[in-house]
Amino acid sequence: MQQIATHCDLDAIVLRFWGKCTPETPGCCRLWTAAVDKDGYGKFQVTNPKGRPKQWHLRAHRFSYWIAWRVSPVVVRHSCDTPACVNPEHLIGGSQKDNIRDMDDRGRRAKGYSKPGCSGDQHWSRRNPSQTVNGERHGMSKLTDRDVATIKEMLASGESQMIIAAYFGVHKGTISKISTGKSWKHVTV
Ligand SMILES: [Zn+2]
């Protein structure tokens, strides 16, 4: 019973999410229309079910990636170089190493590098098909002490275990074990 209620909550959250970006146009960016953070990434507010004052913001592009692929890689990058874009087709999951390599590549070709067009064969993802999302590039994230501290804070504020699991890309059982103290006991908030 509890599971069904949580699932419905998640559907509502996903619907609310897509209401906060520009409509889908094939090949184009879907831009976040709600608040963005200092780096230009969309901020998606997850309402606190217990109505306590603390609010959690997820990075919108990360949540979009999770909606599309149901995994949260360590790093989610934009093939379109547009931080506010939440089009899952423009998001590439990878490791921190991939991210650094990507930044190096971009730095090297910064001179004369023009921003890709939004559709057709000129799109970055079409010219670089090996860089686009596919099953093999998905890596499940590993939790760090810092992640677990955040998870504990979110749990204490009444956030649902399903949402926390979604954001961190781990199984709900992992969050449940943290919640009951069966694992990650050494991390304190
Ligand atoms: Zn885009």
Image (tube, rainbow, N blue to C red):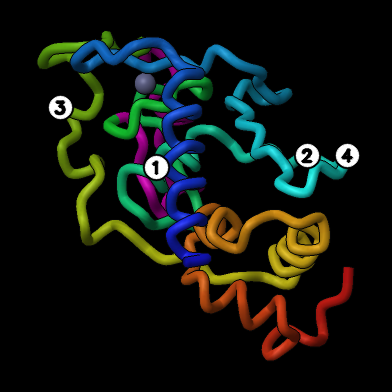
Question: From mark 4 to mark 3, how far is it between C-alphas?
Answer: 45 Å
Q: Is residue 139 left or right of residue 128?
A: right
Q: Which residue is found at the position 17% from the left and 14% from the top?
A: 122
Q: Residue furthest left?
A: 121
Q: Which residue is mark 1?
A: 65
Q: Residues within 10 Å of mark 3 (few under 14, many from 20)?
A: few
Query: Which image quadrant for residue 111?
Result: top left
Q: Nearer the viewer, residue 78 or 50?
A: 50
Circles 1, 3 touching at the beta carbon (< 8 Å): no
- Which label was assigned to residue 55? 2
Name which residue type carries label 4: Pro
Of callouts 1 and 2, which one flags the residue occurring earlier in the amino acid sequence? 2
Give the extent of the magenta segment: 90-113
Of callouts 4 and 3, which one flags the residue occurring earlier in the amino acid sequence? 4
In the image, residue 92 lies in the stretch drawn in magenta: yes
Give x and y (percent) for residue 173: 52, 78
Q: Mark 2 near ligand 1 (CB under 8 Å)?
A: no
Q: Which residue is mark 3?
A: 126
Of callouts 4 and 1, which one flags the residue occurring earlier in the amino acid sequence? 4
Name which residue type carries label 1: Tyr
Question: From mark 2 to mark 4, how far is it between C-alphas?
Answer: 6 Å
Question: From mark 4 to mark 1, how far is it between C-alphas?
Answer: 27 Å
Question: Can I make out residue 46 in this image?
Answer: yes
Give x and y (percent) for residue 159: 70, 54
- Which label was assigned to residue 53? 4
Name which residue type carries label 3: Arg
Q: Quadrant of the C terminus?
A: bottom right
In the image, residue 52 lies in the stretch drawn in magenta: no
